[in-house]
Amino acid sequence: MKKKTKRFMKFEDSALQAALLECLRHSGIAYKLNRDGAVVFAGQDAASVVSAAHQVRDAQFPWYFLKWKTEREAVRYPMF
């Protein structure tokens, strides 16, 4: 019998991690927490968990994937 692979995900920032947990609870995605507070999930739920993490990231950093036509437009946003 093949052992199921577990995956883990955790934001280092506690506020972002709390937002991820809230997003997962709201969406009904199956997960558990390990001793470190990382989200533990099965491979079949990976796309849903990653999508939730992207929602959290995008809410925190809305400029993350923005592109500008010119350097002048881009200068308005700091580089991190």
Image (cartoon, helix red, strand yellow):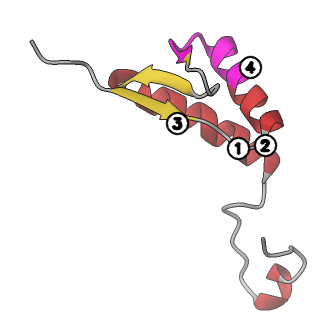
Q: How crowded is mark 1: few (under 14 residues within 10 Å), some or many (20 or more)?
A: few
Work out whether 79 lies above or below 16. below
For marks 4 and 2, the one nearer the N-term is 4
Give the extent of the magenta segment: 21-32
> Residue pushed farthest left?
1
Contact (CB < 8 A) between labels 3 and 2?
Answer: no
Provide the secondary structure element on which disc 4 rests. helix
Please check the rendered image and state whether residue 6 is part of the magenta-colored stretch, yes or no. no
The type of residue carrying mark 1 is Glu
**Residue at the location (64% across, 25% down)?**
37
Work out whether 28 lies above or below 52. above
- Cα–Cα gap, marks 3 and 2: 14 Å
- Cα–Cα gap, marks 1 and 4: 16 Å
Q: Mark 1 points at which residue?
A: 12
Q: In which quarter of the image is the N terminus?
A: top left
For marks 1 and 4, the one nearer the N-term is 1
The type of residue carrying mark 4 is Glu
> Residue pushed farthest bottom?
71
